[in-house]
Amino acid sequence: MSRSMIMAGAAVVALTAGVMQAAGAAEMEMAKGGGKAAAPSAADRKMIASAMQAAPKRVAAGATVVVMGGDGSMRTLREGTNGFTCMPDNPATPGPDPMCMDKAAWEWAGAWVGHKTPPVGKVGFMYMLAGGTDASNTDPYATKPEPGNHWVKTGAHVMVVGADPAFYDMYPKSADPDTSVPYVMWPGTPYQHLMVPIK
Ligand SMILES: [Cu+2]
């Protein structure tokens, strides 16, 4: 997981609205401009490229790419077709942390940020092939590294979220984990998930 997901809850709520706005904007574009949607700006292309770093090429190529505004609002940079949603690196965090997740992981992330119980029986999967940094391995809502807060940095990894507790019981649940082997992040909370380094 990554600190950049902190704002994703609002984003999930805003997703539908964002998509609708995007559709509306496209229609307006068509109405006034004779049918051609505006090409993404250079800044948007950069964010799309960043988001695509998170997953293998063909997964990233088919994914929807969204970006969060500072106020938690969400903007769709590109519509996808394969059920994955990717987000670019959050420039406010120290390291690169783009991510790509399936639909179940997207719902899980929304529950986390919304302080809600994640949906039962929906195991989700995320890619973070560019790595990530987290303010705490024990507090799902920590926003910055603090003394005793168990800040962790993890290289290229994938994540399994929403699995049965028995699944996580197979792995280390240390507050200060060795991030070069699989470990549980936020153990014992409703948002515990498996971090799996791949290098
Ligand atoms: Cu992660």
Image: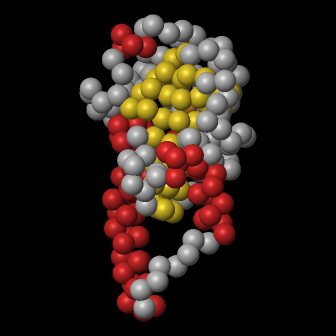
Asked if residue 179 is positioned above or below residue 11 in the image, the reply reads above
On the rendering, which quadrant does ligand 1 occupy? top right
Instruction: Specify the quadrant of the image occupied by residue 136.
Output: top right
- In the image, residue 7 sits, relative to residue 71, either above or below, namely above
Which residue is rendered at x = 36% and y = 72% of the image? 23
Q: Is residue 106 left or right of residue 57?
A: left
Residue at the spot 34% in from the left edge and 68% down from the top edge: 20
Write down the quadrant of residue 134 in the picture.
Answer: top right
Residue at 41%, 77% in the rendered image: 25
Q: Residue furthest left?
A: 120
In depth, the one of 137 and 45 nearer the eye is 45
* Coordinates of residue 176 in the picture (x, y in percent): 64, 14
Q: Is residue 138 visible?
A: no
Q: Residue at x 38, y 89 (%)?
A: 31
**Residue 68 place in picture, x, y as percent:** 52, 55
Left or right: residue 34 versus residue 60 is left
Q: Can residue 28 be seen here?
A: yes
Quarter of the rendering occupied by the N terminus: top right
Q: Is residue 161 left or right of residue 90?
A: left
Q: Is residue 132 above or below residue 80?
A: above
